Amino acid sequence: MPMNIKYATRSDGARTAYGVMGNGPPLIFTPGWVSHLEVFDETEGGRALATRLAEHHTLVMYDRHGCGLSDRDRTDFTYADDVRDLEAVIHTIGAARIRLVAYSSGGPPSIAYAAANPERIERIAFLGTTAGGVAMSTEQRAMLAAVVGLVRAHWGMGSKALADAIAGTFSGGTATPEFVAEFDRFQRISVTGDVAANLFEAILNVDVRDLVALLTMPSVVVHRRDDQAVAFEEGRKLAMLLPNGRLVPLEGTNHIAWAGDVDSLIDPVIAFFAEGDAAPTKGAAASSAVSGVRTVLFTDIVGHTEMMRRLGDAKGREVLREHERITRELLKEYAGSEVKTMGDGFMASFGSVTKAMDCAIALQRAFAVHTESRPEPLHVRVGLNAGEPLEEDGDLFGSTVILASRIAAMAGAGEILIPEPLRHLLDGKNYVYADRGETVLKGFEDAMRIYEVRWRE
């Protein structure tokens, strides 16, 4: 399943691109030194890594300022600017608490954000990263200065040199020429030479070691013993500074998370977050409690990314605000509870299956009226499912939610889709259906018959 690309607005007005896939507790994976969501999603290793992390989580990945699909006009290269990306994404996805994978150069901004907002971070895994303050000899600094100069003077040759250095070997063996070439292309598409040079220089000089002691949440440091980009000693020192952290050493030289043996790198991260699922939360007997039978509704604007590119940030945001206003007014009218908003979509729950269906129909009719009366259309897909989801800190999880999300993703513009069991719950009600046939949804073994609910009068 490809990532759903969305945009978050930072405190300074810049736009940060982020991708979402999967369902479950929110898990944010920070970018490496450069990033590009579309190119990453096209690589075999990138898809493998994202798929593993999204098996039991709502995975969120993003492009840092100056890279990929995010705004490219970066002039501030301090780690504080990277913090703005992270806080904008967290604010936009609307989660009260998140799980965080601080990968590579994402370590320092993650440390800074978690130190300032400890109540927002449930658990944090550090992957091949450092808190900074790396001691270097005069010769080492001269060599790195020469690399920065090459990158700035000729990004083609500079990117190739970095690709050979960072991706030259992984998992204890030699990288294929194809992978090195792929990583070289990834770097050059992700960022310009000037921005790459400035980012590389800033990464070498960052130091947030004094903030690590403020990270009291459970944490783990996963680091390869022969990591060729960030020395293992940096991971060991970080683990020693963390009040509630531990170190998981791994064999191999691979620094790039999606190269080589992805599973060996991601397995300890997934196991660490699974510990949080089993542990009781503060003020509760368990991390999740059954919330009772609920009807879960998902909405999503069709063509959101294209709309934002076509209209620009200001006008695009006006359309999003109208979408939010209509949705929230109708949720209130039909006794629905807003669970969270994902920027261009909503997740809501209802105690009544009939009210949920009436709300879905009212939403589509309201969006149709908007489309007829405004220059910019609002085409929205809606999917519903009923069951007993798990509830934690105001969020809902479990197979009921996952199935509702999968069904919503199947819908087209202006459509409402439901599974056959939900239709049975609505027997005797005055709704009109169209049989869409059986399909096997990702993560579910048995085929499910899907129905479209007709709402146009």
Image: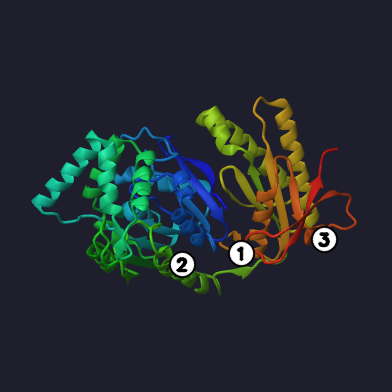
From the image, tell me which residue sits under label 2.
270
Residue 90 visible at all: no
Residue 452: mark in rendering: none
**Residue found 32% across the figure and 57% down from its top:** 175
76 sits to left or right of 365 = left
Estimate the x, y position of residue 247 in percent, counting from the top left. Answer: 32, 70
**Residue found 33% across the figure and 36% down from its top:** 192
Say above or below: 244 vs 207: below
Estimate the x, y position of residue 387 in percent, counting from the top left. Answer: 72, 64
Q: Residue 286 lies in what quarter of the image?
A: bottom right
The first of marks 2 and 1 along the sequence is 2
**Residue found 17% across the figure and 47% down from its top:** 144
From the image, tell me which residue sits under label 3.
425
Amino acid at dot 2? Ile
Q: Residue 117 lies in what quarter of the image?
A: bottom left
Q: Of helix, strand and loop, which one carries label 2?
A: helix
Q: Decide: few, some or many residues near mark 3? Use Cα within 10 Å; few <14, some 14-19, many ≥20.
A: few
Q: Decide: few, some or many residues near mark 2? Use Cα within 10 Å; few <14, some 14-19, many ≥20.
A: some
Residue 26 visible at all: yes
Estimate the x, y position of residue 441 in percent, counting from the top left. Answer: 67, 59
Residue 391: mark in rendering: 1
Mark 1 and mark 3 in contact? Answer it, CB < 8 Å.
no
Q: Mark 2 to mark 1: distance in Å? A: 21 Å
322 sits to left or right of 415 = left
Q: Residue 245 lies in what quarter of the image?
A: bottom left
